[in-house]
Image: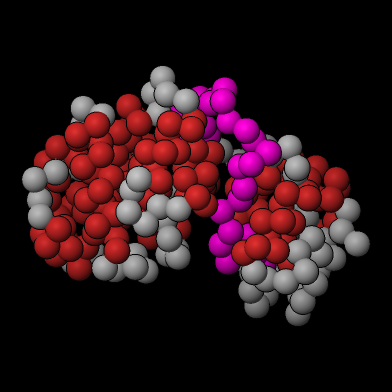
Amino acid sequence: MADYQQILEALLRHKATYGHEVLTPAKCPEALQLIHNNSFAFISACCLDRGTKTEIIWTIPYWLSQQVGHYDPKQFYPMSLERISFLFDRLPQKPRYTKAAPRTFQEICRIVVEDFSGKAENIWKNRCAMDVKRTLLSVYGVGNGIANMTLIMIESVYDITFSDIDYTKMDIKPDVHTLRVLYRLGASPSINTDSAILAARHISPSYPGAIDGPLWSIGRNWCHPASADCGSCPLDTCCEKVGVK
């Protein structure tokens, strides 16, 4: 049986070794710079993060900015859905949900302009977490998993703490990496979303979402689908290596 405490300690040790930029990998330095200097780039990428490789998601704002010469929500705001869809169609690499993504983008743009004076950081500045979450959930295509992930990312990237978060209810956002790692650790009985969420709750009951980043990092960098690099993995000593070939 998996040793949850040992796994938690190993994950938190790994988490302490990297900065938040590791969680926002992009395909070029310019894209990463835009994400960290432009709050609308950050929040729109978070809202688009559905079933697409992470480095594509965090580069989409840069690719869009290259087409139009800016990444200003006030300038995107007058655009029709057809125009936004056209811009998304021209992306070098596209989000998985090609029809839904333009609407998601249009929604978060509208909310930023109409409700937050065109400044995306006002979504979370001097606001409680539950209000931020309600705003995020009002965006087309954003569910509980993305909303929780975004709250966690806001705390990490912008170095703030939401005092009203019930961290026990902040789950991981399951993806192919976290599902695979939790299964191989022996913490999850199968590779599916519900099992992974429950496993994360068992490992880190006070704050399941705290291990989302390190799980993702382990899956991306060591626990590969076909050729796991167990010898170098930070979890090697506490992993049951279920299904590892």
- What is the x, y in percent for residue 108? 28, 45
Residue 31 in view of the camera? no
Left or right placement of residue 19 versus residue 167 in this view: left
Q: Residue furthest right?
A: 1
Q: In percent of the image, x 74 and y 56: which residue is there?
A: 199
State the image coordinates of residue 117 (x, y, percent, origin top left): 21, 27
Colour theme? secondary structure
**Which quarter of the rendered picture does the C terminus lie within?**
bottom right
Residue 87 relative to residue 7: left or right: left
Residue that appears at 24% across and 59% down? 102
Q: Residue at x 62, y 47 (%)?
A: 171
Asked if residue 135 is among those painted magenta in the image, a careful observer would answer: no
* Range covered by the magenta-colored residues: 154-181
- Residue 35 position, x and y percent, is 35, 42
Q: Choose top left, top right, bottom left or bottom right for residue 81.
A: bottom left
Quadrant of residue 19 within the rendered picture:
top right
Q: Is residue 40 visible?
A: yes
Tell me, yes or no, whether the highlighted magenta stretch contains residue 171.
yes
